Image: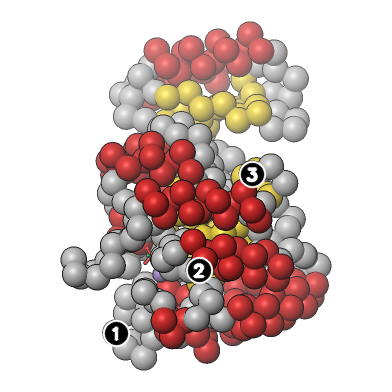
Amino acid sequence: MIVSMKPGATKEQIDHVCDKIRSAGYLAHPIFGETRTVIGAVGSGNNRIAVMALESAPGVESVVPIRQPFKLVGRELKTEKTEIRLDDVVIGGDRFVVMAGPCSVESRTQLLETASAVRKAGAQVLRGGAFKPRTSPYDFQGLEEEGLKILAEARAGSGLKICTEVLTPEQVDLVAEYADILQIGARNMQNFALLRRVGRMSKPVLLKRGLAATIRELLMSAEYVVSEGNPNVILCERGIRTFETMTRNTLDMSAVPLLSELSHLPVIVDPSHATGKRSLVGPMSKSAVAAGADGLLIEVHPNPEEAWSDGAQSLTFAEFDELMTVIKRYLAIEERRL
Ligand code: PEP
Ligand code: MN
């Protein structure tokens, strides 16, 4: 339920409402807006009547139910868009954010060269997997902590923020020591123990849509993270599995404006995993700008032909640089910029 306070409600009145919500068995989730405070009463409490009765408490304007199952990440409770701040990089704000880098961290040289190339082209975040979720147990699984150390070195040298994947709840502390953004991969979108675990961290979480996940399921997974106390979730559309075999996945571009309608969380697009084809990354990146995405996640490799994973969808430095020029033009049409 949403308890809307009157404009100018006092701190005591807000605290009183929060206490009542908690004693009815719900989580009280206050959101302090510019003119008024709204308080979400969420959870499995069993005393709706006590919350509804708050309508007559001092300072309360109204109490209404939240219709959607995703209570905290939905627009009903919080209408303003969430901006996630990493020093000077803001995700979900006016500026478009590009995260770029190799699928896997392979070596120091590979990553440092990539960091410098993508930074020069205008990316704000460096991506790269140190722990890789691979379909086959015989494929390269990542450099693990050594990879994280290389990512940290690349950050120190380039000033870029780091986004890297965490595969298990046990790895969260280690990965969070190095990463600025914790990536939850498509295969882990419904790993609820992992979602709860990153929900107890303060670092932003990049949550990728599962291979066969509906938009509602993606939002419910984000709800797991936010309900544990971490409000900083970035949603990522990375393609879903359909009957089509000519592309690696089918990019559901309509998910981008729809997610923004339903949720206040930032939404980015990963055209690399969505298509699996280098030639499609540019066109889909342009469409992502038109669809209103807050940013892009793009795989870039010094020599895609020799990449240890996902070479076919990785751009060369020159291709990435060219794409960034085009993206800047498309952003200008939308009166936005990098
Ligand atoms: C990745 O970003 O390298 C990755 C494994 O992506 P996804 O989880 O979307 O397949
Ligand atoms: Mn990849």
Query: From this viewpoint, is residue 48 visible?
Result: yes
Residue 27 quadrant: top left
Residue 325 lies left or right of residue 248; in this view the side is right
Looking at the picture, the colour scheme in use is secondary structure
Q: How crowded is mark 2: few (under 14 residues within 10 Å), some or many (20 or more)?
A: some
- N-terminal label among 2 and 3: 3
Ligand 1 positioned in quadrant? bottom left
Q: Say which element carries label 2.
A: helix
Numbered tag placed on residue 77 in the rendering: none
Q: Say which element carries label 3.
A: strand
Distance from the alpha carbon under mark 3 to that under mark 1:
39 Å
| Residue 325 point in image, percent of width and height | 74, 78
Q: Mark 2 points at which residue?
A: 110
Q: In this view, does 128 lie above or below 12?
A: below
Task: Tell me the mark number nearer the camera, choosing from 3 and 1.
Answer: 3
Task: Tell me the mark number nearer the camera, choosing from 1 and 2.
Answer: 2
Residue type at mark 1?
Phe
Q: Residues within 10 Å of mark 1 (few under 14, many from 20)?
A: few
Residue 58 lies left or right of residue 71; in this view the side is right
Question: In the image shown, does 277 or 179 lie closer to the viewer?
Answer: 179
Q: In this view, does 101 lie above or below 188?
A: below
| Residue 68 point in image, percent of width and height | 43, 47
Residue type at mark 2?
Gln
Residue located at (56% from left, 26% from top):
30
Q: Name the residue under label 1.
A: 243
Residue located at (40% from left, 12% from top):
23
Residue 51 quadrant: top left
Residue type at mark 3?
Leu
Task: Tell me the mark number nearer the camera, choosing from 2 and 3.
Answer: 2
- N-terminal label among 3 and 1: 3
Q: Name the residue under label 3.
A: 86
Q: In this view, does 42 lie above or below 124?
A: above
